[in-house]
Image (cartoon, rainbow, N blue to C red):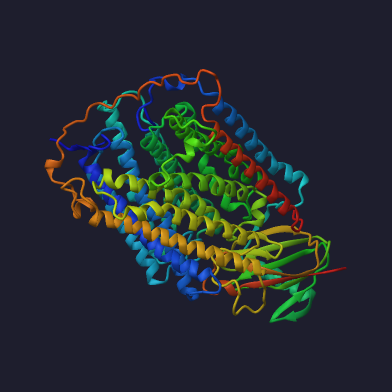
Amino acid sequence: MSQFRVCPDTGFYFDKSAESLMKANAVAGAVALLIAGIMALGVVLTRWQEVHLLPADLFYQVLTAHGINALIFWIIFFEIAIMYFASSVLLRTRLAAPRWAWAGFALMIIGAVMNNVAVLQGNSSVMMTSYVPMQAEPHFYLGLILFAVGALIGCFVFLGTLVIAKEDKTYDGSIPLVTFGALTACIIAVFTIACGAIILVPTFLWSIGYINHIDAEMYRVIWWGLGHSSQQINVAAHVSVWYLITGVLFGARPMSEKVSRSAFLLYIFFLQLASAHHILVDPGISSEWKVFNTSYAMYLAVLASMIHGLTVPGAMEVAQRSKGYTKGLFEWLRKAPWGNPVFSGFFISLFTFGFIGGITGVVMGTEQINLIIHNTIYVPAHFHATVVTGTTLTFMALTYLLIPLLFRRALFLPWVAKMQPYVFGGGMTMMILFMLGAGTLGVSRRHWDMDFTGAALSFEYPGTAYMMMAVGAIGGVLGVVGGAMYLTVTVGSLLFGKKLDENAGFLQSFGVPMPASSYNIEQPERLEMASKVVEEHGDGGFEAPGTFVLAMALLVCFVVYYFINWDYLSSVWPLS
Amino acid sequence: MTSFLPPSERIWWNVPVGKQEIVWIGIALVWCLIMFFMMPYWHIYGKQNLSNEAYQTTPAKFQAKVDAMVEQYQVGEEAGFPIVRPPAGSDVYILGRLWQWYPILELEKGQSYRVHLSSMDWNHGFSLQPVNINLQVLPGYEMVVTMTPDQAGDYAIVCNEYCGIGHHTMLGKIIVKEK
């Protein structure tokens, strides 16, 4: 039975069921992103104090829906698609247990819908974190649990596919680096979902009255094993996608397999400890615990990210230099395809994730510095730099790559696609920078009214804080426009994009398989190891000097900003 | 020859690592260690640390302590809140509830106070402005932080943990007076 087709442009083999599942998951993710984006508009237009669009109840409801759809549903649907790609396509193998994979997908859909319904009904405006003892409706928690079970099935389908590929010897040597990164994401995902189950199942039972008390601190500690770790899945996933994109666009090879894979291994060992970042100013937790966990045991996961920060652009630089872009330090970067949204999306994401997301994350995750940052709007500013301009923008860039390959459609309105990463990345970066500023001035996150209307006492934030919130909101609106551009291009491509395969119909875009005639390969040829490197740098010099300069620039910003924050901390009231 | 193909060497972990990566890993590791040791360093030499002293409590027990303090040291009233001036160096209590920080404290500049914080209901966020000190306040836990106000003036306590529809009205006050 033939079940593979080969992509004539790239030579990738697509297994029939894997292909349908990837499409279905990617489309479901895009729907979640649409909801999240609409909600985002409500959030930014309310926090822009001069506009102050929504009433309080609606604001908190919209904020809850925004957080869950963006941080959980959009990203995890898309990550499942990436895992299937990194296993079945990259290893040229059939997908393990496609029926289970569909069952998992169905559970994720049911869970996502159930949770959204609970939030829309209005009695579950508890924020994504749903800290007890504030209570949501039972189906709020049940929706999340079902979604998580579905995602867990997806993880096991991915692992099973790796096993099948190994048994069937569909590839020679070790799994590719990109698949290794996806495996890292999968292992972190299993841990994450386990934490989610440990805390959300009892919370669900509590919401239906079966358990009468859940300790508020215990909830926070375990919930963050879900909440923060789910964002660590993203880091592993989008770093893998960075390697994939540099490979596809530039033919880049890892500078060193050992270094890049060791860095992923450090993620597996240490990245999870970062859930402690949320507990740094909580009662009843010792400083020893905080220091060890918040620093990922001596910042070993930060080390891993700094390594990827060098090796991802470094691999690209080496590939570009070998093509003759060798002038000066940065010709390789200047002559990169800046008009291709796959590249521009990837590079803006790499840059903002490292310079803004990474640095602010480490600074605010420092035990004592957290005192001046906890729960201010600095926190969402940080995680928008990691999850929005980092993960989301990476996934957008990947979409532009996958629409022709996977959906067999040409991009609709390519000029919109070309501008999209700049509008989205630029708008969000503007929002992030001004929110960081407002957070430093003490503006609270998750807060409807910075004028405190109706309070018995009064307090006024400085005028600068209002200005920063307003400028940030304008950036946020731009970001929403960028998001709308992305959805216009993707949905438009599926509906109106030129068909690159005559069977790429409308329903096929949502996961309905193409006719059997499209799949004419029974078993792809075995995947060979990459060709050997011709030793081209015998002088012992740096292979990627431009990247090294960029990395040093990152380090200088990092060091300066880190100590500025210690200085700021030293100016507040002494505490002991 | 790319990152999405199996490595070109079967035994890829024996391929020597380039000089550039080794130098960068070395630099990055040193920086990571510096950041790590900054935290214990600040515990010894810095002035802004949490003691992590905390007790399990109940809303009723904590309320009783707050009431006792208010009864003993109340000196005035503002907007329905008692203003309390406890002696320097003593234990002082602030409770968070929907949607108040209670009571208003009047402290003396340069003196240290053991501030006890707890919540009567949900999670609250103690955000002292414009100093910008932020602490998480939970029901069932009594956190003790020794604070030494070093400037006179009126300070607001903003609630910065979402606590329902009236969250934005939850403001408290600490008054710091010159000696």
Q: Is residue A566 among what the camera can see? A: yes
Quadrant, the N terminus of chain B: top left
Position of residue A218 measured from the top left corner of the image (x, y, whole percent): 54, 54
Residue B151's quadrant in the figure?
bottom right
Q: Which residue lies furthest to the front in this view?
A: A327
Say if A63 sits above or below B35 in the image: below
Q: Which of B118 and B147 is in front in this view?
A: B147
Q: Where is residue B44 in the image (x, y as percent from the top left)?
A: 76, 44
Q: Residue placed at 38% from the left, 23% from the top? A: B8
Above or below, comparing residue A273 to residue A470 in the picture:
above
> Which quadrant would the C terminus of chain B be assigned to in this image?
bottom right
Q: Quadrant of the rendered structure where residue A189 is?
A: top left
Give above or below for A394 relative to A462: above
**B157 lies left or right of A121:** right
Q: Which of A333 and A425 is in front in this view?
A: A333
Does residue B117 appear left or right of residue A119 in this picture? Answer: right
**Number of marks in the rendered image:** 0
* Residue A396 horizontal/vertical position (percent): 38, 50
**Does residue B161 appear left or right of residue A483 in this picture?**
right
